[in-house]
Image: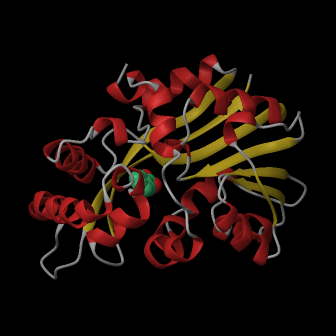
Amino acid sequence: MTSDTARTAKARAKASARQDWDAGCYARNARFVSDLGSPVVELLGPVAGLRILDLGCGDGALTEQIAEAGATVVAIDASESQISAAQARGLDARIGDARSLEFDREFDAVFSNAVLHWISPPEEVISGVARALKPGGRFVGEFGGAGNVDTVRRALVAALDRQGHDGSGADPWFFPSDSDYRALLQDGGFSVDSIALIPRPTPIPGDLGDWIQTLAGSFLAVVPAEERDEIISDVRDASRASLQQADGGWSVDYVRLRFSAHLR
Ligand code: BEZ
């Protein structure tokens, strides 16, 4: 079992609750997250007649692609700001917590992109997904797997520790290995059709500091406001040799865990 699976779900959930999701900020600094989600939509294969739940839809960019392919989609997300943005696209988007899904045998497939690493414990998500699916229904998704954003993650933990904070305690992310997540899916009643870790170094649109403020807010939230610039500066310095490109841009060491499973 990897350290990500062993780390207590309660600690991860507590840290994750400190992350703030502002749809405008996300659109400026993290649009690449949905832009790079097309392979997962292809794996899902949304066609007319299918009823699909998009788990953690964000601002609905991929939900819209699924709907445009002809499927009927219900989208949920925990962030009011993101749900408002998704509703503005005309989608059936609702506030919801992936750990307490109340759907009962109504979807042909559940889809999720770049969200499951934020939600602990994973067992609660998987059992809610299983309940939401019709018999034989599919669970298709992608999220951060073992080693994801490791350079920045290590640098964040070290920078917080150096300033006397609990770096690991502020870490919200669950990045399991393929074998650990396969076991979780199987224990939750699924047969796994495919699962793989996919290294995907990803150029980001702006500075690493903007990425940290948009996507790693849980770490900054435990630090007094006047110390945050120093944390960001420490992380930039520690990451520069591995992640800064010759033209000054940054490429973050993403690793995706992509899977497709169906209810046994
Ligand atoms: C991800 O999609 O892998 C990710 C996004 C934000 C922070 C960390 C990881």
Q: Residue at x 69, y 73 (%)?
A: 85
Q: Quarter for ligand 1?
A: bottom left
Residue 258 in sight here: no
Q: Is residue 90 left or right of residue 146?
A: right
The front one of 261 and 75 is: 75
Residue 49 location in percent, x, y?
90, 55
The front one of 131 and 39 is: 131
Residue 38 location in percent, x, y?
57, 64
Q: In the figure, 106 relative to 206: above or below? A: above
Q: Is residue 178 left or right of residue 230?
A: right
The front one of 71 and 33 is: 33
Q: In the figure, 151 relative to 134: above or below? A: below
Residue 248 in sight here: yes
Q: Quadrant of residue 22?
A: bottom right
Q: In the figure, 64 relative to 114: above or below? A: below
* Identity of the residue furthest to the bottom in this view: 247
Q: Quadrant of residue 202?
A: bottom left
The front one of 163 and 159 is: 163
Q: Residue at x 31, y 56 (%)?
A: 224
Residue 45 location in percent, x, y?
71, 55
Q: Residue at x 74, y 22 (%)?
A: 264
